Image: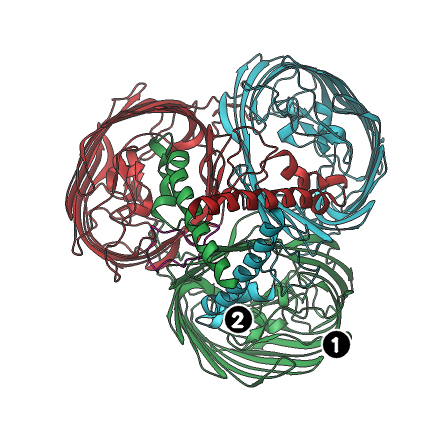
Chain colours: A red, B green, C cyan
Amino acid sequence: MKKIIMLLFSCFSSVLLGQQKALMPHSIDRNPQTSGDRFYLQQQGETVALQGNELSDAYDTSQPRDVLISTKGGVEVTTNDGEFSFQLGGRVLIDAAVYSEDKNTLGNGSELRDIRFDLEGRFYADFIYEMSIDFSDGEADIKDAWFAYDANYPWRYTIGHFKEPFSLEEMTSKKYLTFMERALPNTMVPGRSLGFGMNWIGGQTTFTAGLFGDDYNDDADDEGDEGDEGDEGWGATGRLTYAPLADERSVIHLGLAASYRKLDDEQEFRFDSRPESHLTDIRYLDTGKLNMSDSLTLFGLEGAWVSGSVSFQGEWIQALLLRDEHENPSFSGWYLQGSWFLTGESRHYKQRSGRFGRVRPLNDYGAVELAARYSTLDLNVAGIEGGSSDNITLGINWHLNPQIRLMVNYIIVENDIFADADGDVIGEDEPALIQFRAQADF
Amino acid sequence: MKKIIMLLFSCFSSVLLGQQKALMPHSIDRNPQTSGDRFYLQQQGETVALQGNELSDAYDTSQPRDVLISTKGGVEVTTNDGEFSFQLGGRVLIDAAVYSEDKNTLGNGSELRDIRFDLEGRFYADFIYEMSIDFSDGEADIKDAWFAYDANYPWRYTIGHFKEPFSLEEMTSKKYLTFMERALPNTMVPGRSLGFGMNWIGGQTTFTAGLFGDDYNDDADDEGDEGDEGDEGWGATGRLTYAPLADERSVIHLGLAASYRKLDDEQEFRFDSRPESHLTDIRYLDTGKLNMSDSLTLFGLEGAWVSGSVSFQGEWIQALLLRDEHENPSFSGWYLQGSWFLTGESRHYKQRSGRFGRVRPLNDYGAVELAARYSTLDLNVAGIEGGSSDNITLGINWHLNPQIRLMVNYIIVENDIFADADGDVIGEDEPALIQFRAQADF
Amino acid sequence: MKKIIMLLFSCFSSVLLGQQKALMPHSIDRNPQTSGDRFYLQQQGETVALQGNELSDAYDTSQPRDVLISTKGGVEVTTNDGEFSFQLGGRVLIDAAVYSEDKNTLGNGSELRDIRFDLEGRFYADFIYEMSIDFSDGEADIKDAWFAYDANYPWRYTIGHFKEPFSLEEMTSKKYLTFMERALPNTMVPGRSLGFGMNWIGGQTTFTAGLFGDDYNDDADDEGDEGDEGDEGWGATGRLTYAPLADERSVIHLGLAASYRKLDDEQEFRFDSRPESHLTDIRYLDTGKLNMSDSLTLFGLEGAWVSGSVSFQGEWIQALLLRDEHENPSFSGWYLQGSWFLTGESRHYKQRSGRFGRVRPLNDYGAVELAARYSTLDLNVAGIEGGSSDNITLGINWHLNPQIRLMVNYIIVENDIFADADGDVIGEDEPALIQFRAQADF
């Protein structure tokens, strides 16, 4: 019986495919006009028939291909042979914060934290791309904009705008962080820049490194004559992770990263940081502009341990700034956090990229997670009065389903006397705050 | 015969589905690398096979689902079980205006009125979202950005950035308005804010209410010390509609709305309004900044009547501003409009949301609609010389098909002596203008 | 046998289609609530079943339609009858430049040249649209935003924001240019404006003309009273192309274009131009603001010749500015370029639109192209010291596949003494530069 069906099916496929080929020229080719070339792409590019299961040869674009289509709120289209794919999704993060103020007013309110739209795909089997843009502040903030050559396993080569490989918390998407905001030391982390990178994957090891220019919208202007332009800075960053244990529910992750950055011709450098709440605009910690700054060198250590529903994670980051005619300051900070899923889930570790991912609730009512974090950052070094701050955070996350999450964070902020936003606010401020997030991604 | 076919089909489905499952791991799983996790979503999320008609169980994401795909210029993908869906569309509105000027120059010209891009969908059956962004002014103006719990009929709970429920004309999408711009009193309507809302649907009745913060890009700064931040304002808004008659071609709509807003810590308030033309930047009506303003309370009455091709619609809105150490002004305005489809169509009323929707022409040559409106707004109250204005509009709409519309509006503007844009232009200006729109949505 | 299969198939289709129709109302119609109307579009609009091969009648939207879906990194959905379609794609262009400076510093660095997202489609058979937005500078720069009536072959009528038809190089997409940037005379070309246009296609001839307002984000303000608004300018532009030979590998293209523009009420005019590198912000050539300017008239001549792997292309452009109370300057510039595919490909000419398109490599290792260009622009006329410049460019392009391209350009810049960025930099500067591009489109 099965054989007959198979036979029927192959006949059926060819009937159908023949028909579609016959249909297309008439339907699509009509009205050939000036800008009409785009409507002919289908004939030159990847034309895909929905039915029929003969896999087409790679690079033979004259032949229809089977596609798989799925939606999880967004949409994904993949050719059956996996050589071409397209995915569109996005995220909506809505925040509100109430501040228990001490010395300064912090501004209760609400905001769109992320309104992001994300395109990604694969073409000609060997290349992948991503284009991700955030609109939450009413402008177009480019996040990921890169493409990569992905056909030389275990290596991948990437060019464009993407995250410099530094810090477990930075590498983990904001969608999957345990707390609403990253810890205080994250202000020292490079983040996204324009550059060229390569990844290598071993069994338990990953290595990622890259050469980077500045962020896409930085432009160095000399302080001298109007019209003159300065050179941009550049950086080199690398990260090594090792996960001797990476089961579904048991993980040991160790990581090491370093980064060197030659500053641009303006030679100005600044570290500043809000408390671990994005809604207020007050950045208590602020070194001010440090002129005659030449280069910044970073070191980072990472560790994470997952055992069933319990997990711990910590990082230590140090930054050494080299300045002309000034003492060279060395800033440092660290955090330690723990989390516990009351409902039995585990944090999801992705060994291939050395970072954490999406939590999938085990029960219909979702997953509930309790978490706590201590973080500290000290910017009082070498005569620079940037301030020092400790934040203690208690958090509850309710993952209603894999794509929706509600979060509450209670944060106690302890600032020293120099944490005065470079003189704009009163130091030794010790506010507390409670903040909420509703998050959906698709 | 039918039985055999069904049998054949189910065998056929399983053959095919089996094959697809076998194919995917090879094709998609290849090259597991650092950022490659995204290519595995298909296995964890909603993977959908095109053929096969066994409906998968809810929440069982390991099993392929059937999808329906449609295009009407945009694209829509829905799983057959309706639990997941995705829709992408947009709109292009192109305007031109010619002014018959009286005392002031108004600036003939053309503009992109709306260039909007819209994502929406459903996931895990119970949740829906929308993300809609307008780029017409060269920035990213976030319109809708919300998600909602939609599984407790007749209630729906929404969080994010969306329209406060006030005014029939505001609730109706600009795509479906009878005139190019909303009437003068619309300047008093709250519009979109960040908040939490709930809807209730009865047979002939709808009730919508919400608690709102400010608009997404408002941020309150205290006037005092640099660095200090003020609290944002908040509001509560509710709307009740009753439609005892809501047939295809006969509608009676009545509505009632109220809104309270506590202003933010800046305590500044301003009403201003262009004439009913967006192209000029002159806002004749302008109260200027009213300081020490504490709260704003709004009341609105709505009525609409459709009888075959003829329809009437009107609203009255009143705004009471409470100020410290000042008299409390109470502004008000109203409009009344009528429309007639020469070609026999009716305005399309949507009872479930208490607003008007898309017109579908009955004939190949489209639908032609004549319309007239009188509107008035008076901002001269309590010593405030904000000006008063009447606008009379005559309009012709040609709906070429359900998604394309051409519009012409002729507007006679009558301003009083105080309608001087807070002193920037000459008052008692009485220009006329003709404006055109070409609109496509998809 | 084939007959039986066909019979089986048609039964099978009807079973399946019937089932889908039955399923939809239950699944999609559930939870009818306030903003839920969007989920009913499927019933009102173009609902499409995946299986079944009966073509539905035009405009009968109650009946499911067959669709074809393809991905080439982006996605394309077309109904089998070709009456509706949707396409989403984009591009990522990443540049870096190193300057061998002479008298001025030019600023080595990297940038995102284009981060573009593109929607287009067809609806109701007769109408097409395009919406294309660039985010590369962190804002939303609207490129194409138009729709067109496309059912009166050989004519097409377009309204919206699109390129005024002038210059072969301007008409050709940046994705398909031989060099990274357009030649110096391109600064005189109108580019995109808001307007109305029409195209006509003959056998070897195309004619395109349009009436245009200003660019979408221009707004004319009078210099007089605050609040007053000036009229926008307008223009009329037309282009005629003739291609007596337009084979796969042999092309002769001739073109002629003219443009008239009435300037807006500000009456200020300026030509300025960077060297043929976008990364530096220094525009050596700069007429400064020329006041009392009334109108600009342009003439352009184009020629291109493709013979196998070799091609040549050149253009000459002249601009006549009419000024009140000043001499009327007449600027002009031209370029000539040649290219040679080492790997045997030809430049792809699109006769229907009179421009060049995508190169498709013949070999697995891609296509390699060598190219050279000389261009010149003289803005020293009628007492205006705008400067004069010659650029010589040598380029290598490596098309890895039809959608990925790497480019290197080496450029020698020769400026005269007046090429001083209107006084901001030192004239007679003669730098050289090397710039790189990695380009992906999908």
Range of residues picked out in magenta: B50-66
Q: Nearer the viewer, residue B190 or A197?
A: A197
- Callout 1: few (<14), some (14-19), or many (20+) C-alpha neighbours within 10 Å? some
Residue A226, percent from left and from top: 55, 26
Q: Chain of mark 1?
A: B
| Residue holding disc 2 | B189
Residue at x 40% of width, y 36% of height: B28
Q: Nearer the viewer, residue C249 or B54?
A: B54
Closer mark to the observer between disc 1 and disc 2: 1
Q: Which mark is residue B344?
A: 1
- On the question of residue A267 being in view, the answer is yes
Q: Which mark is residue B293?
A: none
Dot 1 or dot 2: first in sequence order is 2
Which amino acid type is marked by label 2? Val
Residue B229, percent from left and from top: 35, 55
Residue at x 53% of width, y 71% of height: B189
* Left or right: A383 as drawn, with respect to B161: left
